[in-house]
Image (cartoon, coloured by chain):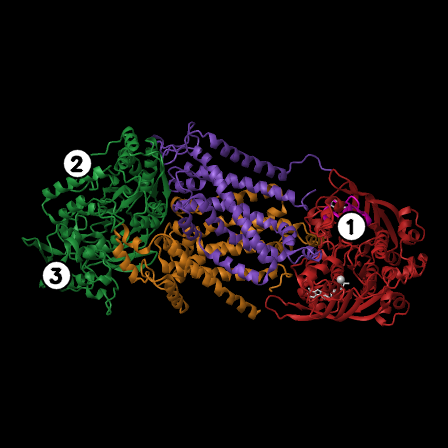
């Protein structure tokens, strides 16, 4: 009955998709080609401000910022993706179990969970780096473990309320097992907060990696990541702002893309939104 | 209720023990040694061993843990290796600084982002919505070490509205204290607004489709009231969980902000201690933050039945 | 007399899709009760909701005009609309179970409307009025109920709360969407009398949506009939019920259960379900730190159901019927007594035994909407019941789902989500889900309360047929005495958590011994309608 | 009431001179206590509390006469007994004084310290030592600062320093600041200020060392006038800070040492050709220029370029020759296997050097992989000798013998040592006993050439101390030890 009206919902999806497409495209290109060697040191180009030749300037080693941002896209996004996947999968599983079964299982898991929550990420990272060595899998594991307890808590909180709903009861009446009920009825309805947490975590992980590399615990340099570029750029906030702005924008664009697309997707999946 | 509370408090003891023990072991497994750090490039093995002995670090780890635990029970958390300060009073002192910032920040962040998220949900897929979501996402991608510095340079240096470094406690001079904690608090607020807004929005979107919301509207309830009175309690549970997490997280981890704004807070104490491998301080801080976490989460758990009366407090 | 409400040529539909309401016109005068009847899913609820501009997302209003007291309100500004809602136009929603906010105490929810529309009233006065309203709709413990949360109420009690809430503001127009589906006949009469009393007192106009022709006959002056979104007949009630013109109306009236006594095919054998003296009590919390109190919902109930038998449970609203059903299904823990299924005690059963029980026993919930997972399509919901029957191939399952939906009159609704259905349609999905498993025992909690006469008949026939073919047993919880009389072989009458009378249907109906039973029977409009052998002329002149 | 505020990047560790300290601690403590001798800006030793120092002909007895009119912060006069008392505290092993082992054994072992009269004490050594006075002045040992008895509690535990310095400890707010107050009864020397020696009269009433861990925050604090002195400005901020109105910058070369350690026990790097290959692959001058922005001079010798012993052999630079490097590597049988170089982010120039070296080595076909770890971990690895290559930073050694001693030694017993060469070891020990400058020079030149042949460490430069301070402060200077000095400085209001 409505005519062709501009729909922000569609706009969300389009903007989000476009942002992600650009980032992914850049990451893909970077595998075979970047304008300059992302590791190539050039003493004459140190702190070169943006110009036609180097649209995003050069850093303290004279390395081209654009090339580094492109080369860093893959590492940053894949580290973030793996970490979030780790935390979400483990956290959701545990959160579902504790929230749904309650009782002693709940107590025991929450005990460990609260203990883990209290652990500062740096300490975990230090410990794991000592065991695994400073590489990106160590980071994924350290950050994954650090973020899992939050997921557990958020999922558990939602599940506590959903398990009292009648459709969960109905599933039990049908004779469905606990696990099936959890996965089929509880999980999808606990999805909204989980999605928010996961997309936010994506940003946190990139920034945490940044904080870690600030301390010398991140993805080993000189391999660029947005995180370590951002961390390295901090002292030059005034004198060479382009060093920080570029990776910052990359992170923002990726997050915005993921969030917008995620929201659009969630709306699409939510039956109550459909026309 | 009282019994239940007591029971829950008792169950926190294993958590605290678990944290204490794992920190105790972990920090000793991590390479690096407080004594080597103290001696720097001139540390030779013999001297190091001698000093380690003096600090009781050469004992087997379970003996060290036992001794520490016995003292901890009586409230004595030992003395710092770095500067000899008594740990327990130090932690309490530093905690006051962190707590004042964090509590204000979380309160303000919540009272800004929850309404904001709800309005975005209410106007879902409108320009308002996309602006709020976009803004929140942008804030999510700002690292606190950048944001803090930016604010410091702008308001502290360029405009000179607030002092750049230093701290006085509220007890000494509360107006002064406010000027010192203003920027760190604002930084934290901006950092936390992103995720809380999005969470509030997402859960409100879910709730707004429900029948009782329509029913409330049918009673002529204003939209503001529909949001605040009818949608909020039902949508608030995940946001509440998140706020609990944020609160706990911040109480233990605002090291970055405290460093940028030169505040003597708990987070910086812990992080500095980690880098200095100052075992007694690390252990003390962890015990303390774990306790905070447990308390905060206990409160969060106790509140679930308020949002959804069907969830019984066991 | 000027029309309070005037609807002309209203159309409602899915954007760029089919219409669910197609060209409906009706008007209501002050002091008049106009009934809207029609088949389940014919668009009654949507017409009602569109008056307040509260169509669910996914549906939009098309052409047509809605006037309230001569004022066009289909495009009224926000502010005006808000003043109308609740204040001038009160509405009772069809599904009381999901229309109350679970997180807010009843008292606050009731007061809210008053606070907005009667701002001059003081707090204390508001509270008194609310309590008074609750008492008038038959809730005794009104003061305490104000402090309770919705989930502590029975279905009928919630419905009464909704009515009390709508009436408290004394609106000019009351839209009541199936307001008494969950009420026993006694309470129903009280509530409807209250409503009609209001029309007399204040000239309130009532738009009464109902499928209960007895109610229509007794309370309404005029009546409109909808079918598939179209208005098929309108006029004076007596005229339409006495002399229906449209084939659909004729079918509707034909479907009124006749007082044909239940064919006494006596079931024999060992009871499939034996309930021994069970008691259930609920804890009522008084706030976070307040003192909690106990309330006894069941005070020692014993009953037996034999294979192939339908046992009806009737009784007042809040008497513990739903609790009984849920306790049998192990969804509520009894504080005492025993339950045995096929001789096996359930309360102490191990997982396997419990699973066997679950595989053989199904529930049709009193609140079908909440019992349907909002994220699953109708087809999937029904099919899920077949999941644990491994012998079936996917194609077979599909076929059975299609069959089951066809049997309840929902062919072609597989792809819908629960929120896209009408009240009656949701109830039928729940029925299909329970019956598709071919269980040995079905506990049906008000399974036909939201269905119009024709579909009700269809479902009752289906139940009877299944019983004949497969010999399953049914615990049929209902307040609809006519329906009970039609299908139950035995009747149990409950009051306040106790069984006050039980026996063969005809014996109970013929010679009710307990005064409460007698009162129930006398108050039943449907029974009255059928036993008066369709003497509508009399009914409509009341 | 005038107050000067000085930033330090971390809290001090204690107020006990030379015990549980780090460089920030030393910087503060030297305002409070003074020893018998002190370092001058050219790293030579001058008397401080001592009026004059006499050495016996056999070089075994050092007699110190205290200046007249010296007073402790509590007003008590300084006597020979105080010197004896302080020394007994330092030489008690329980104290864990940093220089304890230097005086209890080895080259400068002190046999006895005796009171000659009220103002005179005599140290007796086991053997003649060129280093004795230098050790006594050592900054990281608190110059063996003389303390009053009341600095200790009745049970002998340290309470707070009651010294003779121009400032007294007023308040230590842990984690926030250390505040010092001017000592009005200070008896100053008459020579002009020179390093830690010379006149040390204070004119500012209060000095507050503010702990500002974040370097950008410290910079902002200086700009905004919240502090007056930023004693260790980052080179990268130099240009910006210089251009700032109201801020002055002063640069002094220091005696620290930045270098790349190569583990000679490593299978690959045990081959000297490989080590030489790496050395020739690196353009030291270019790196130093880039990393220190011209504030420090490139230097391939372990002897600091400001040292009096720095001559032609030391000044010679290793030739940057990628082709030669390639050739040497090939000769060493190198086939491109990765070599791990450890570095950290705590010391930015050290990290930057590592990045440059990696890039330069790549040009010469040498594949260096960077591993950035946290400082404490790196230090641990350093102490254990557990690395292939490491970008490392040594603190200042003020005598060439000590410069060599800090990294040369037997790896079997001291795994942290980098250069394990018995012949060199003998020479170093020799240099410690001889006092004659020319003879020592000869030994150091010999050591230099041995060092260059073995190439266990590629020295890059000796850093610079860049102090930035408000132009309200008059007379402030950076100097070779890099520590802030708030005496002899006036504050304009
Ligand atoms: N959100 C929706 N999207 C699409 N169709 C819908 C939606 N909600 C309801 N419908 C359809 O509109 C029709 C009319 O629904 P309505 O609720 O008005 O029926 P009703 O007459 O009240 O029936 P009942 O007596 O069963 O409550 C139904 O066929 C239903 O399936
Ligand atoms: N969770 C609960 N907490 C407290 N009280 C409850 C709870 N559930 C039910 N009750 C109370 O138990 C009594 C019986 O409720 P039940 O739902 O069994 O009634 P019912 O016979 O099914 O009524 P109706 O016909 O109105 O549905 C009611 O008084 C109700 O208020
Ligand atoms: Mg309806
Ligand atoms: Mg019921």
- Confirm whether circles 2 and 1 share one chain: no
Chain B rendering hue: orange
Which one of the lettered chains is coloured green?
D
Location of residue C151 (image quadrant): bottom right
Which one of the lettered chains is coloured red?
C
Chain A rendering hue: purple
Q: Which quarter of the image is occupied by the N terminus of chain A?
A: top right
Left or right relative to A135: residue D484: left
Q: Which residue is mark 1?
A: C425
Spatial CA distance of label 3 from label 2 is 40 Å
- Within the magenta stretch, is there residue C245? no
Residue D315 sits above or below residue A184 on the image = above
Q: Does the residue tagged 1 have its C-beta within 8 Å of any atom of ligand 1?
A: yes
Spatial CA distance of label 2 from label 1 is 99 Å
- Mark nearer the viewer, 2 or 1: 2
Residue A178 sits above or below residue D394 on the image = below
Q: Which residue is mark 2?
A: D313
Q: Is residue A41 visible?
A: yes
Q: Nearer the viewer, residue D487 or C380?
A: C380
Q: Nearer the viewer, residue A168 or D214?
A: A168
Q: Which residue is mark 3?
A: D112
Q: Position of residue A13 (x, y in %)?
A: 60, 38
């Amino acid at each position: 009955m409505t005519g062709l009206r501009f729909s922000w919902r569609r706009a969300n999806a389009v903007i989000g998709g476009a942002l992600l497409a650009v980032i992914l495209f850049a990451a893909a290109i970077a595998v075979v080609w970047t304008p300059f060697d992302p590791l190539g040191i050039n003493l004459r180009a140190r702190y070169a401000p943006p110009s036609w030749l180097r649209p995003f300037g050069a850093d303290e080693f004279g390395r081209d910022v654009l090339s580094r941002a492109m080369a860093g896209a893959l590492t940053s996004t894949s580290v973030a993706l793996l970490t979030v996947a780790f935390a979400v999968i483990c956290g959701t599983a545990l959160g579902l179990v504790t929230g749904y079964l309650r009782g002693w299982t709940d107590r025991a898991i929450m005990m460990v969970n609260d203990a883990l929550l209290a652990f500062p990420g740096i300490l975990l990272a230090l410990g794991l780096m000592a065991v695994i060595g400073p590489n990106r899998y160590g980071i994924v594991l350290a950050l994954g473990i650090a973020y899992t307890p939050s997921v557990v808590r958020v999922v558990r909180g939602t599940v506590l309320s959903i398990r009292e709903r009648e459709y969960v009861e109905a599933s039990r009446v049908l004779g469905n097992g606990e696990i099936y009920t959890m996965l089929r009825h509880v999980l999808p309805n606990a999805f909204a907060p989980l999605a928010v947490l996961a997309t936010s975590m994506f940003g946190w992980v990139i920034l945490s990696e940044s904080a870690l590399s600030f301390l010398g615990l991140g993805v080993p340099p000189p391999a660029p990541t947005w995180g370590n570029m951002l961390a390295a750029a901090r002292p030059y906030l005034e004198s060479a702002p382009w060093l920080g702005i570029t990776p910052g924008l990359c992170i923002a664009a990726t997050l915005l893309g993921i969030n917008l697309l995620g929201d659009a997707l969630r709306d699409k999946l939510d039956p109550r939104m459909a026309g | 209720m009282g019994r239940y509370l007591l029971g829950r408090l008792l169950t926190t003891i294993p958590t605290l023990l678990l944290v204490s023990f794992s920190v105790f072991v972990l920090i000793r497994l991590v390479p690096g040694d407080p004594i080597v750090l103290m001696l720097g490039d001139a540390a030779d093995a013999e001297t190091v061993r001698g000093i380690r002995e003096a600090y009781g670090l050469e004992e087997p780890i379970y003996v060290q843990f036992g001794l520490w635990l016995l003292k901890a029970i009586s409230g004595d958390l030992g003395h710092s290796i770095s500067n000899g300060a008594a740990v327990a009073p130090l932690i309490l002192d530093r905690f006051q600084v962190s707590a004042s910032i964090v509590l204000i920040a979380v309160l303000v962040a919540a009272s800004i982002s929850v309404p904001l998220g709800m309005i975005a949900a209410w106007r879902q897929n409108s320009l308002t919505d996309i602006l709020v979501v976009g803004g929140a996402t942008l804030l999510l991608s700002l690292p606190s070490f950048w944001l803090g510095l930016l604010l410091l340079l702008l308001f502290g240096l360029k405009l000179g509205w607030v002092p750049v470094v230093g701290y006085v406690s509220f007890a000494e001079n509360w107006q002064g204290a406010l000027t010192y904690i203003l920027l760190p608090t604002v930084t934290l607020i901006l950092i936390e607004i992103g995720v809380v807004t999005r969470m509030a929005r997402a859960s409100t979107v879910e709730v707004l489709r429900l029948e009782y919301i329509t029913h409330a509207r049918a009673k002529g309830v204003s939209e503001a009231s529909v949001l605040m009175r009818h949608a909020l309690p039902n949508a608030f549970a995940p946001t509440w969980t998140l706020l609990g997490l944020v609160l706990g997280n911040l109480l233990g981890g605002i090291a970055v902000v405290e460093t940028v704004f030169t505040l003597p807070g708990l987070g910086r104490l812990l992080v500095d201690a980690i880098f200095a491998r100052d075992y007694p301080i690390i252990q003390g801080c962890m015990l303390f933050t774990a306790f905070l976490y447990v308390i905060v989460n206990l409160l969060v758990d106790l509140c679930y039945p308020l949002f959804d009366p069907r969830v019984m407090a066991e | 007399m000027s029309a309070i409400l005037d609807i002309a040529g209203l159309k409602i539909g899915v954007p760029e899709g089919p219409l669910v309401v197609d060209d409906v016109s009706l008007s209501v005068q002050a002091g008049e009760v106009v009934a809207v009847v029609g088949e389940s899913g014919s668009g009654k609820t949507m017409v009602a909701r569109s008056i307040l501009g509260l169509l669910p997302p996914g549906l939009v209003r098309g052409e047509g005009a809605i006037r309230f007291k001569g004022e066009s309100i289909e495009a009224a500004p926000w502010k005006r609309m808000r003043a109308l809602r609740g204040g001038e136009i009160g509405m009772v929603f069809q599904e009381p179970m999901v229309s109350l906010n679970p997180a807010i105490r009843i008292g606050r929810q009731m007061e809210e409307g008053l606070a907005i529309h009667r701002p001059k009233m003081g707090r204390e006065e508001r509270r008194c009025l609310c309590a008074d309203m609750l008492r008038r709709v038959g809730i005794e413990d009104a003061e305490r109920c104000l402090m309770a949360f919705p989930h502590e109420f029975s279905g009928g009690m919630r419905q009464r709360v909704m009515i009390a809430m709508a009436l408290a503001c004394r609106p000019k127009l009351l839209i009541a969407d199936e307001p008494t589906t969950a009420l026993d006949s006694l309470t129903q009469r009280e509530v409807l009398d209250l409503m009609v009393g209001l029309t007399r007192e204040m000239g309130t106009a009532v738009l009464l949506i109902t499928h209960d022709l007895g109610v229509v006959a007794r309370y309404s002056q005029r009546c409109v009939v909808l079918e598939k979104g179209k208005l098929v007949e309108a006029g004076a009630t007596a005229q339409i019920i006495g002399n229906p013109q449209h084939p659909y109306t004729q079918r509707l009236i034909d479907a009124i259960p006749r007082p044909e006594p239940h064919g006494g095919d006596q079931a024999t054998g060992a009871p499939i379900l034996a309930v021994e003296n069970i008691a259930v009590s609920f804890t009522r919390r008084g706030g976070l730190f307040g003192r909690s109190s106990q309330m006894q919902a069941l005070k020692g109930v014993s009953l037996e159901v034999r294979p192939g038998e339908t046992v009806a449970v009737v009784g007042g609203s809040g008497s513990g019927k739903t609790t009984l059903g849920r306790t049998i299904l192990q969804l509520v823990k009894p504080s005492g007594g025993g339950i045995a299924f096929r001789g096996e005690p359930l309360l102490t059963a191990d997982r396997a035994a419990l699973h066997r029980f679950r595989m053989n026993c199904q529930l049709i919930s009193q609140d079908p909407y909440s019992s349907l997972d909002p994220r699953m399509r109708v087809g999937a919901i029904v099919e899920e019941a077949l999941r644990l029957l491994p012998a079936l191939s996917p194609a077979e399952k599909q076929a059975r789902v299609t069959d089951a939906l066809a049997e309840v009159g929902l062919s072609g609704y597989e792809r819908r989500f629960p929120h896209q259905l009408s009240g009656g349609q949701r109830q039928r999905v729940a029925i299909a889900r329970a019956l598709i498993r071919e269980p040995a025992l079905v506990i049906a909690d008000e399974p036909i309360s939201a269905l119009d006469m024709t579909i009700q008949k269809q479902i009752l026939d289906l139940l009877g047929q299944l019983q004949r073919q497969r010999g399953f047993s049914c615990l049929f919880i209902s307040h609809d005495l006519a329906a009970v009389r039609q299908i139950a072989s035995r009747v149990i009458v409950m009051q306040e958590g106790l069984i006050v009378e039980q026996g063969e249907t005809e014996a109970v109906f013929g010679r009710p011994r307990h005064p409460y039973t007698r009162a129930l029977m006398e108050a039943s409009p449907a029974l009255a309608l059928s036993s008066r052998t369709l003497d509508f002329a009399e009914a409509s002149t009341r | 009431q005038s107050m000067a505020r000085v930033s330090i990047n971390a809290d001090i560790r204690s107020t006990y001179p030379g015990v549980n300290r780090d460089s920030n601690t030393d910087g503060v403590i030297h305002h409070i206590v003074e020893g018998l001798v002190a370092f001058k800006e050219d790293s030579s030793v001058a008397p401080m509390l001592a009026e004059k120092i006499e050495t016996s002909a056999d070089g075994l007895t050092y007699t110190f006469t205290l200046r007249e009119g010296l007073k402790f912060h509590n007003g008590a006069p300084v006597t020979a007994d105080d010197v004896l008392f302080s020394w007994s505290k330092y030489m008690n092993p329980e104290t864990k004084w940093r220089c304890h082992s230097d005086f209890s054994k080895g080259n400068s072992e002190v046999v006895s310290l005796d009171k000659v009269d009220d103002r005179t004490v005599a140290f007796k050594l086991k053997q003649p030592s060129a280093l004795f006075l230098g050790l006594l002045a050592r900054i990281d040992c608190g110059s063996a600062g003389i303390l009053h008895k009341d600095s200790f509690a009745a049970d002998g535990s340290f309470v707070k320093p009651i010294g003779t310095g121009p400032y007294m400890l007023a308040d230590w707010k842990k984690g926030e600041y250390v505040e010092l107050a001017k000592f009005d009864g200070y008896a100053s020397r008459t020579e002009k200020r020179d390093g830690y020696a010379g006149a040390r009269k204070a004119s500012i009433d209060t000095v507050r060392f503010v702990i500002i861990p974040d370097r950008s925050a410290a910079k902002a604090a200086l700009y905004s006038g919240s502090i007056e002195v930023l004693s260790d400005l980052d080179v990268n901020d130099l240009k910006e800070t210089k251009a700032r109105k109201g801020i002055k910058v002063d640069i002094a070369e220091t005696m620290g040492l930045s270098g790349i350690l190569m583990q000679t026990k490593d299978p690959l790097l045990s081959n000297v050709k490989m080590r030489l290959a790496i050395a020739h692959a690196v353009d030291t001058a270019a790196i130093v220029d880039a990393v220190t922005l011209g504030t420090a001079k490139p230097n391939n010798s372990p002897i600091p370029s400001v040292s009096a012993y720095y001559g032609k052999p030391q000044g010679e630079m290793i030739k940057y020759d990628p082709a030669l490097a390639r050739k040497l590597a090939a000769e060493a049988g190198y086939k491109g296997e990765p070599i791990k170089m450890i570095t950290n982010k705590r010391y930015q120039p050290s990290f930057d050097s590592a990045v440059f070296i990696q890039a330069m080595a790549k040009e010469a076909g040498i594949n260096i992989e960077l591993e950035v770890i946290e400082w404490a971990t790196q230090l641990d690895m350093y102490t254990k000798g557990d690395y292939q290559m490491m970008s490392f930073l040594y603190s200042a050694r003020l005598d060439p013998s000590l410069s060599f001693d800090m990294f040369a030694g037997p790896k079997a017993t001291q795994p942290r040592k980098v250069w394990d060469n018995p012949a060199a070891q003998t020479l170093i020990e020799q240099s410690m006993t001889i006092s004659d400058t020319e003879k020592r020079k000869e030994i150091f030149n010999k050591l230099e050439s041995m060092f260059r042949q073995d190439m266990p460490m590629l020295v890059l430069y000796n850093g610079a101390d860049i102090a930035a301070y408000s132009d309200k402060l008059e007379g402030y200077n950076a100097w070779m030890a890099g520590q802030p000095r708030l005496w002899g400085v006036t504050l304009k209001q």
